[in-house]
């Protein structure tokens, strides 16, 4: 027999061939010495030179290598193997399911010489059940690696199915107990239980939902963060029939987030001092009429002043976000008059309102009670809303600020700021409260926004009670509405009284 690699032309008595069949010959060290043409096709190689000389186990998927090595040694002992199923690896790294049969050939002295292996590609012929099993196995492995569970809820029969990893996430033995809503909620953090319940009901109404919530691990009492997404399916009469969802352990991401937030908090705190100094000196230069300076020099100072003001605003916003996220924002409740505070904030914008010839209307209900809340947080809400309405309304527009008592909710104020400005494009409205999001029309028209204002308001309202929503039409205007309780709650901010 020639030593040079050659494509085999073995004259086998073939049984009925249902599957593509390839033949490979190995030496006793499992090195491939010869192959037939079909081997190239089956494993996606172009020439026999590429494959000959390779270790046969290199064509086998990692999880099956051990089994195949054991089988190879059995064949070397003289045992024939038929129908050994495993996953093969193609040249491009993709897998194929193979069934292999192998026999030992000995030399004239009876010493083991080579092993001939017949391989069938059974990938397309796996029974449906096997394919489902295989897919489930792969899914389970993927879920385990990613700390990712999935679940299904048959709404009509109220039956849940959780994958093994779902059980693991909820600190339960896989498939150990039947699942229901109580099992789901048992170790959800007390403060998030209501949120999770609402999330399920809301997802039935909306068709889908996304929620991050906390879970208290019963084994060590440590808090874990889960990210949940789900989708509801309906019958022809729009009755909900099924909900499917995923659950992802994002504790590590949250911890990293926390470290980043702490870093941002320290950094912005440190930056605020020098920035304020730059800002103040630029302002002084401008106010002292900049005697002896040329027009160009004055223009430079004006630009310096504008840029430093924008940076101070960004730094302040970053600091506010980080303090709120870290639960370190001081909260000092006091009795305050909403119209008074609104007017006080508005004074800061008098100049801009006049400059842009905006007609600013204030409508306050007559008998408004005082609100009990933190002054800084309340002023922040007014500042962000008023400055947005002014920034995103072209000259000569109208802004109307209304403060009243909500007729449909007890002990709640309604604050609304309506403008006749650029509006928010429909397709971008759902992202508007996302951190650092700015709509395309806003970015094109107004420089220097941070995309943090609405995010800050949302955080304040989540922590201190209240809600924000809006209606908007492009090039017609936007109305932001806020519901504020008479007495703010204080979840997650530092109480200073
Ligand atoms: P910023 O105004 O600094 O960009 P915000 O968080 O306050 O950040 O607002 C986020 C985005 O929401 C804005 O960039 C803009 O696209 C949109 N937006 C907010 N208020 C209005 C408004 N009154 N009219 C039109 N768009 C608005």
Image: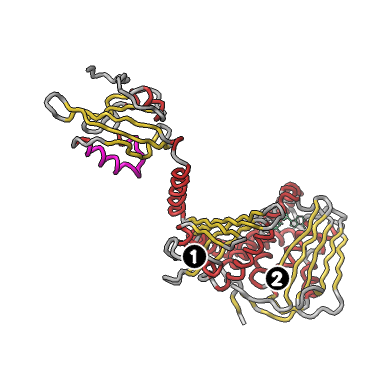
Side of 48 where 325 appears, left or right: right
Depicted 218 relative to depicted 35: above or below: below
Residue 263 x/y as whole percent:
52, 62
Q: Which residue lies most toward the top here?
A: 2
Quarter holding residue 493 = bottom right
* Mark 1 Cα-neighbour bin, 10 Å: few <14, some 14–19, many ≥20: few
Between 351 and 139, the one nearer to me in the picture: 139
Which secondary structure, mark 1? loop
Residue at 86%, 68% (x, y): give it. 362
Quadrant observed for ligand 1 in the rendered image: bottom right
Residue at 31%, 23% (x, y): give it. 13
Residue at 74%, 52% (x, y): give it. 298
Distance (Cα) linking label 2 and label 1: 38 Å
Side of 104 where 483 appears, left or right: right
Of the numbered discs 2 and 1, the one sitting upstream in the chain is 1
Residue 104 x/y as whole percent:
22, 31
Which secondary structure, mark 2? loop
Q: Label 2 belongs to which residue? A: 466
Q: Is mark 2 within 8 Å of ligand 1?
A: no
Depicted 417 relative to depicted 77: above or below: below
Query: Which residues are the magenta region?
Result: 58-74
């Amino acid at each position: 027999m020639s030593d040079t690699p050659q494509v085999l032309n073995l004259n086998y008595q073939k049984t009925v061939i249902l599957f593509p069949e390839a033949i490979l010959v190995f030496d006793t060290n499992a090195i491939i010495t010869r192959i037939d043409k079909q081997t190239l096709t089956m494993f996606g190689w172009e020439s026999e030179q590429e494959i000959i000389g390779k270790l046969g186990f290199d064509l086998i998927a990692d999880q099956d290598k051990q089994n195949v090595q054991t089988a190879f040694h059995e064949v070397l002992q003289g045992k024939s193997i038929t129908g050994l199923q495993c996953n093969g690896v193609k040249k491009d790294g993709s897998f194929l399911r193979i069934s292999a049969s192998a026999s030992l050939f000995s030399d004239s002295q009876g010493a083991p010489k080579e092993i001939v292996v017949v391989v069938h590609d059974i990938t397309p012929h796996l029974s449906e059940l096997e394919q489902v099993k295989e897919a489930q196995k792969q899914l389970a492995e993927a879920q385990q690696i990613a700390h990712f569970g999935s679940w299904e809820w048959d709404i009509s029969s109220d039956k849940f199915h959780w994958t093994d990893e779902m059980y693991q996430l909820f600190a339960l033995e896989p498939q150990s107990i039947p699942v229901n809503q109580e099992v789901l909620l048992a170790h959800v953090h007390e403060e998030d239980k209501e949120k999770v319940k609402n999330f399920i009901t809301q997802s039935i109404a909306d068709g889908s939902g996304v929620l991050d919530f906390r879970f208290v691990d019963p084994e060590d009492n440590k808090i874990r963060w889960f990210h949940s997404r789900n989708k509801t399916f309906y019958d022809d009469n729009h009755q909900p029939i099924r909900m499917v969802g995923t659950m992802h352990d994002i504790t590590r991401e949250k911890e990293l987030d926390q470290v980043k937030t702490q870093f941002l908090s320290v950094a912005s705190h440190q930056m605020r001092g020098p920035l304020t100094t730059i800002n103040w000196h630029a302002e002084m230069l401008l106010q002292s009429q900049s005697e002896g300076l040329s027009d160009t020099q004055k223009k430079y100072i004006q630009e310096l002043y504008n840029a430093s003001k924008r940076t101070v605003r960004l730094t302040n916003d970053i600091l506010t976000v980080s303090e709120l996220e870290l639960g370190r924002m001081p909260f000092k409740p006091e009795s305050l008059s909403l119209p008074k505070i609104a007017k006080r904030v508005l004074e800061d914008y008098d100049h801009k309102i006049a400059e842009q010839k905006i007609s600013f209307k204030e409508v306050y209900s007559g008998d408004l009670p005082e609100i009990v809340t933190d002054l800084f947080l309340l002023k922040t809400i007014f500042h962000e809303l008023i400055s947005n309405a002014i920034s995103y309304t072209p000259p000569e527009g109208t802004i109307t600020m209304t403060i009243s008592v909500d007729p449909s909710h007890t002990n709640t104020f309604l604050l609304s700021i309506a403008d006749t400005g650029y509006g928010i494009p429909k397709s971008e409205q759902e992202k508007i409260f996302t951190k650092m999001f700015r709509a395309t029309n806003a970015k094109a028209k107004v420089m220097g926004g941070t995309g943090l204002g609405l995010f800050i308001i949302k955080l304040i309202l989540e922590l201190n009670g209240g809600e924000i929503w809006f209606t908007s039409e492009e090039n017609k205007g936007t109305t932001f509405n806020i519901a504020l309780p008479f007495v703010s709650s204080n979840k997650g901010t530092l109480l200073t009284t």
